[in-house]
Amino acid sequence: MNVAEAAARLDHGLAALGVDLPRARREKLPAYLALLYKWNRAYRLTALKEEQAVGGHLLDSLAILPFVPAAGRLLDVGSGGGAPGIPLAIARPELAVTLLDGNSKKAAFLRQAAIELELANISVHTGRVEQYHPESGFAAIVSRAFAELAEFAALSRHLLAEGGRWLAMKGVWPRGEIARLSGVARVEAVHPLAVPGVEGERHLVVMRPV
């Protein structure tokens, strides 16, 4: 991956999103991509081509920043290659981000990325979300391509702190999934997202417990 080219695309995209990051944080974002694609050769962490990575991984993750708590605890369920959790942790160092994935190889990458990028606000848990029982809950639980809304809410309900929200990243407006929530959770808002470099629709579904 050409880090300089990725950085230029990133700067343009951040400006379009209205996201202003200090230089030290901004430089960690393309460094994360370089690490992701280095490991991807052996671990199959992402199917996105490198030329799609700035929009598909970084800007797609950072597009939800206005809806993410400024501080507190956030859980990224099914983190895989680390998006959106790692970009959010880079952008918000005061946010304690837990990356959860059931695949031990992916979890190994997530731990190494946190070490190499010097992200002290990241912790990693290997396992299934329904079997995860930390001492305290999370102010926000985010997922990207993890499961349908009802399953996402049902599996992680025990992890949500009082007053917490689910943040589900979706493509097209998920009308069918919303209709199938059936008392598990209620939708607080559906936010259309304009993500630079990403073709097709993107939406963030914000939910809270019934």
Image: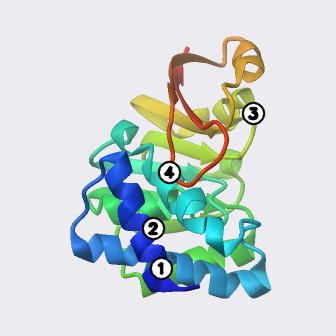
For disc 2, the marked residue is 9
Q: Camera-side residue: 44 or 153? A: 44
Q: Quadrant of residue 81?
A: bottom right
Find residue 182 and report its horizontal and vertical position in percent. 72, 12
Sequence-first disc among 3 and 4: 3
> For the residue carrying disc 1, how many other residues have a C-alpha within 10 Å: few (<14), some (14-19), or many (20+)?
few
Q: Which residue corresponds to the image point at 50% horizontal and 51% vertical from the top-left?
A: 196
Residue at horizontal 73%, vertical 78%? 105
Check whether the beta carbons of the residues at disc 2 and disc 1 lie within 8 A of each other.
yes
Kindly report which numbered mark, 3 or 1, lies closer to the viewer in this rendering: 1
Answer above or below: position of 51 versus 58.
below
Q: Mark 3 belongs to which amino acid?
A: Glu
Marks 2 and 3 sit apart, C-alpha to C-alpha, by 31 Å
**Circle nearer the N terminus (2, 3):** 2
Position above or below: 15 against 195: below
Q: Which mark is residue 148?
A: 3
| Residue 140 placement (x, y as % from top left) | 44, 40
Residue 168 higher or lower than 207, as above or below: below
Q: Of helix, strand and loop, which one carries label 1?
A: helix
| Mark 4 surroundings: few (<14), some (14-19) or many (≥20) residues within 10 A | many
CA–CA distance in space, label 3 to label 1 = 35 Å
State the residue at coordinates (76%, 86%).
41
The residue at which mark 1 appears reads as 5
Q: Is residue 48 above or below residue 88?
A: below
Residue labelled with disc 4: 196
> Real-space Cα distance between discs 4 and 1?
15 Å
Left-right relation of 36 to 73: right
Res 134 visible:
no
Q: Tell me the SS state at disc 4.
A: loop
Which of the marked residues, 4 or 2, is nearer the chain's N terminus? Answer: 2
The residue under label 2 is which amino acid type? Arg
